[in-house]
Amino acid sequence: MSGRVLVGVKRVIDYAVKIRVKPDNSGVVTDGVKHSMNPFCEIAVEEAVKLKEKKLIKEVVAVSCGPQQSQETIRTALAMGADRGIHVEVAGKDYETLGPLQVSKIMAALAKKEDAQLLILGKQAIDDDCNQTGQMTAALLDWPQGTFASEVSLDGDKVKVVREIDGGLETIKISTPAVLTADLRLNTPRYATLPNIMKAKKKKIANVKPADLGVDLTSRLEVLKVEEPPQREAGVKVETVEDLVGKLKETGRI
Amino acid sequence: MLSGCSAGLRLLVPRCCVLLSRSVTSGSPGRAAAVDGVLSAFRSICGDDGVSLGEAVREQHGKDESFHRCRPPDVVVFPRCVEEVSALAKLCHRHRLPIIPFGTGTGLEGGVGAVKGGVCFSLRNMDQILDLHPEDFDVTVEPGVTRKALNSYLRETGLWFPVDPGADASLCGMAATSASGTNAVRYGTMRENVMNLEVVLADGSIIHTAGKNRRPRKTAAGYNLTNLFVGSEGTLGLITKTTLRLYGVPEEMVSAVCSFSSVQAAVDSTVQILQAGVPIARIEFLDEVMIDACNRFSSLSYPVSPTLFLEFHGSERSLEEQVNTTEGITQSNGGSDFQWARDVETRNRLWKARHDAWYAAQAMRPGCKAYATDVCVPLSRLPQIIVETKEDLIESRLTGHIVGHVGDGNFHCLMVMDPSDQDELHRVHLFTERLARRALAMDGTCTGEHGVGLGKRSLLCEEVGPSAIQVMQSLKDAIDPKNLMNPGKILV
């Protein structure tokens, strides 16, 4: 086994920001808005770094697809303990239409190129909530997948994954190489410390173009419109139960 | 509407209960009329949604986490920027309406109670984090920013703001009350960590205590206005920005729990650890009553005896040294083996249990009210005061849990009392006065971190003496001659 783990990290609008829709309803405002690493990607990085600290794997490689600024996100992963980074340059219109299908093709190509033992991703991104990239990548590679992982343990050339499912927890054992996606309870990501941020500046980030990996970025999806949810309106107070029933009938609720 | 607010504006979700035609019903008729008269002017400044007369909203803004009863203001306003705060203050000044600043309402001394009614300025919509300078270790924040929100914002920079009073309090509110917390022994309190403030005075003037945008690490320029306003509890002005000193996130952190057979042994260990020069990050004492309550509330199983919760920050090598020195000291005082908490989940659980002490104490006697004392004495007097206080508790037949930042010589006695038992309430009152005077007699203070608020005004007089009180009063008269800023607090 190569002992190499690839971790995908996505640069998204920070979870604490109040999102605003652009006046032309084509998308959300991103200019001047704080961005950071997708929280589930942080958990994925933490898990990979933990595996390396336990000496179960040898190298953690952080991958991000996007414009120049995606390098900041890779640097954060390096500060958390990843060894090197790969920045897949996607900018302009291509970046606006970049989605799980294209990213999973890129990830699949890199996983093969880097001879990865594991590919760990966040279960979903907080901007599109797609929850597709991990699963699509596994399908393209024909690798097993352990998604919504809340516990991961390596056992020889197998991985035991405890998954969060609707009914509770499901434990599966899959062989490597495999794709894992991190759920909330998998771990608590470490904060980057100043000395580690300094060290991360010296770690290497390779630049790759999607074309070099033989990936076509054409999107099969077109966003038609983005709108805010309807504004919450004031409630109405009524005096009697009869009034209440009357109002409910009036608005067609009963 | 004022066009002063810049790109930070966002749509407020319309509040459910702003009834524009309802007028003020509480308080003195003269003041009610005055408030009525300015309502439309208020609305023209911060919008219809920015002014609330709703009873539930006013009650929410008339109390904090203390036992002091709710004293709702006549109206609550929600300004969005400092220009709106200034315009609203000018109106209040003209009409002689009290001004009460409100951050998160997490204070412990009744500081937000509108004892003379008036206008509560809820500053939560001013929630921008401005001007982060990672290389200079400083950041400026507005009053709606809480300490957890700031630390989350900073998480990728390797920096944090360590002052941790437990509650997720507004940072400007923490500046106003000179807050402290479990980390003060290593990182200091707000006094040491506020570099500059933007303040709106009662007449609407806007000042910058260290000069606009200034953030040198040290200064010798003029009177120390910044630290005048820190701890002024809203009685001198409304804090609308604070520039804070940031620190590097520790490389490693490890926590430990150590039990002792006596209070004396635990507190002696604390004093010795500090005298040995260990840069300990947190050193918290819990007596056996407190540990028992925490065990039950947080499902822990620590031995029920005087306990120290410790936390060490530093590089791996530095931690080893700190821990060895500390263990040597605790063992020489008969302390148990350390119970370790290394990973972040275990450490968080430990400190949450400590911060939940307030609720754990109340859970021991459901239906009862709680009150926390807050004395702080020089380190060398700590063993004596804690031992004497525990004896007093037993003699007075009171329920009291002792928990505290013993590294600063500061501890809290969490009293739990039945609000319908007048005799118990009276005994608690006398006990807390004795405790405060015991601390004063030991060259200490009646309030290490919670502030004076409503309940400690006469103790403040005893503590600083009449001449100093005179000076405080003169400052108050000079800065707020009409006594509109949070009347009834700090000074009698």
Image: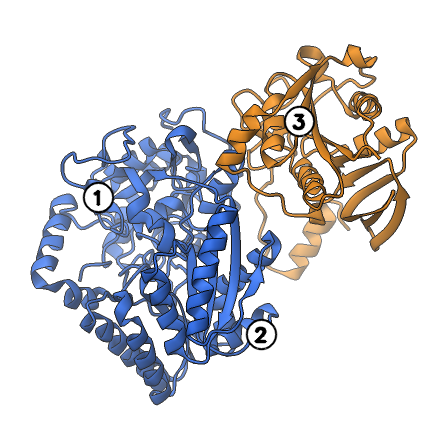
Q: Amino acid at mark 1?
A: His
Residue hosting label 1: B95
Q: Secondary structure at mark 1?
A: loop
Q: Is residue A21 left or right of residue B172?
A: right
Q: Amino acid at mark 3?
A: Arg
Q: Residues within 10 Å of mark 3 (few under 14, many from 20)?
A: many
Look at the image and give the colour of chain B: blue
Mark nearest the camera among 2 and 3 is 3
- The CA distance from mark 2 to mark 1 is 53 Å
Residue hosting label 2: B296
Chain (orange): A
Q: Secondary structure at mark 3?
A: strand
Q: Say whether marks 1 and 3 touch (CB < 8 Å).
A: no
Residue B428's place in the image compared with A135, above or below, is below
Residue hosting label 3: A84
Q: Say whether marks 2 and 3 touch (CB < 8 Å).
A: no
Mark nearest the camera among 2 and 1 is 2
Q: Is A58 or B287 nearer to us in this picture?
A: A58
Residue B307's place in the image compared with B221, above or below, is below
Image x and y of residue B123, in percent: 39, 42
Image x and y of residue A48, in percent: 71, 39
